[in-house]
Amino acid sequence: MDQQSLDELRTFYASFGRLPLPDGTRITETTLGGVPAVDIAVPQAVRGTGTLLYLHGGGYAIGADRTGVPLAAGLAARAGLRAVSLDYRLAPENPFPAAVDDALASYRQLLVDVDPAGLVLAGDSAGGGLALATMLAAREAGLGLPAGLAAFSGWFDLTLSGASLTGKEAADPVFDAADIRAYADLYLAGSDGRDPLASPLLADLRGLPPLLLQVGSREVLLDDSTRLAARAATADVDVALEVYAGATHVFQHDHATDPTAARAIDSAASFLRRQLEPR
């Protein structure tokens, strides 16, 4: 992918940050663990109920904290949570593991004021994979794990071994296998895609908190979610897989206008609320 194409994609993807927000949403620029972020306050948030750390998508090469705000705010409003959307560093300027380092630093900072039982993670596409990698990195660092994780069309396998990568090309209107490979090459920059922090599908998942995986049936990344669900179940992790028939990559972006997307966000919010309930 050349620089001009990357710049054009970054400009286009910025439009996702202008999608509708729940009424009364207030956003404030901040930093979290030294990483730029947007703090999201929704009127529905109940103080002390919980905090959502949201990681935007974009193939680790495009997107920003603002592009994650509409999805994060939609989740936060439905779940009654405070939310933070992170502006982690992007490739190719900052390849793997820069995004993981930023997300872990931010997660570590949240733990200063919030018990891990009061934290949940969510993300879309690469952000879903990054959210899972952040949990793995937190476990390696001996930190408390969050209460749960929700991923929308998560990208969990940078080795690109899923059969749907080519098998779903004709059905996927957003990506083909070459697109996914281009993003992987930018992010990995020669690093081994089998590293569990790059491809959390390949990680030891034992002991992780509950996971919710949502994916559309018309995605080249379909198998990333279905295989992760199977591996999580084998590892005795509480996992829920929701495949939405006919849906495409991160269809949840349209939750303000599309009934299927709204249903998916409602389901994710309910899942996150359940994980935050006192045990």
Image: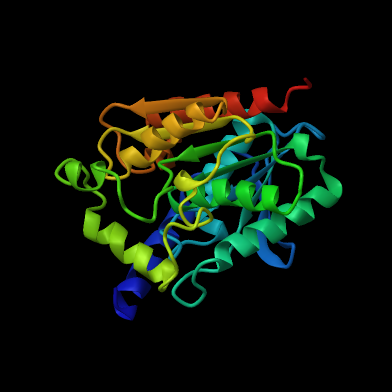
Give the number of callouts. Answer: 0
Q: Residue at x 40, y 41 (%)?
A: 153
Instruction: Confirm whether residue 259 shows in the render.
Output: no
Q: How is the image coloured?
A: rainbow
Looking at the rendering, in which quadrant would you find the C terminus? top right
Q: Residue at x 52, y 27 (%)?
A: 239
**Residue 58 as seen in the image, left or right of residue 177:** right
Q: Residue at x 45, y 44 (%)?
A: 201
Residue at the extreme right: 113
Looking at the rendering, in which quadrant would you find the N terminus? bottom left
* Front residue (pair 186, 233): 233
Q: Residue at x 49, y 39 (%)?
A: 151
* Front residue (pair 77, 279): 279
Instruction: Choose top left, top right, bottom left or bottom right for residue 3.
Output: bottom left
Instruction: Confirm whether residue 25 shows in the render.
Output: yes
**Residue 171 as seen in the image, left or right of residue 269:** left
Residue 198 place in picture, x, y as percent: 48, 57
Residue 160 place in picture, x, y as percent: 32, 53
Instruction: Choose top left, top right, bottom left or bottom right for residue 179.
Output: bottom left
**Residue 118 as seen in the image, left or right of residue 189:** right
* Front residue (pair 237, 42): 237
Residue at the extreme left: 170
Residue 138 place in picture, x, y as percent: 69, 50
**Residue 193 as seen in the image, left or right of residue 136:** left
Residue 84 lies, with reference to residue 146, above or below; the image says below
